[in-house]
Amino acid sequence: MTNDFDPFNRFREIATWFETLTPSSLSQIERIYAADATFCDPFNELKGIGKVMAVYDHMFLNLNEPRFVIHQTISQDRHAVMMWTFNFVWRNRAQKIVGCTHFEIDQSGLITMHRDYWDAAQELYEKIPLLGFLMRWLRRRLAIQQ
């Protein structure tokens, strides 16, 4: 990347990379993330491209057919928010997680900050049999009565 890139187009390239991510395309991660990038999601808070790569390696190792679908990107300068659905198969059942990611890119167009926002309780924990029952009960107890 050069210093005279168009951030809007760069975020489109980043979205395409995520939508077409495979174990083999993961080897091109240095074209997407800065060496000292930070990554945060409901389970991880880490720094460094090697650790970011380990998150995606773990995803491919533990889930079948993982795939991101980017629905919308809103960007300003070197920041963007991408709304997405993450589809995968786990224990022979199709699953999906809906969320968004806040990205910041550096002057070269590489991601320096990646922060995922999604509801782990609703999107994941409620789907686990015993824990799901407890989480759904708790949600009903805390919700306003209409």
Image: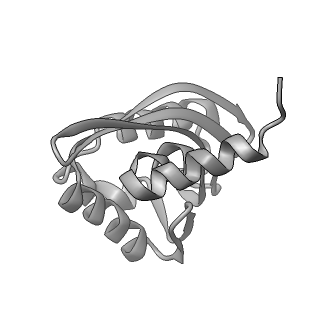
Image coords of residue 73 (percent x, y): 60, 29
Pick whichever, 80 or 6, lies toward us.
80
Image coords of residue 20 (percent x, y): 29, 36
Residue at the spot 66% in from the left edge and 40% down from the top edge: 80
Q: How is colour applied across the structure in the image?
A: one colour
In the figure, 129 relative to 58: above or below?
above
Residue at the spot 47% in from the left edge and 29% down from the top edge: 70
93 left or right of 53? Answer: left
Residue at the spot 61% in from the left edge and 43% down from the top edge: 4
Where the C terminus falls, by quadrant? top right
> Dividing the picture into quarters, in which one does residue 113 lie?
bottom right
Residue at the spot 41% in from the left edge and 57% down from the top edge: 130
Pick whichever, 70 or 7, lies toward us.
70
Tell how many labels: 0
Image coords of residue 10 (percent x, y): 53, 37
Image coords of residue 100 (percent x, y): 59, 40
Pick whichever, 59 or 9, lies toward us.
59
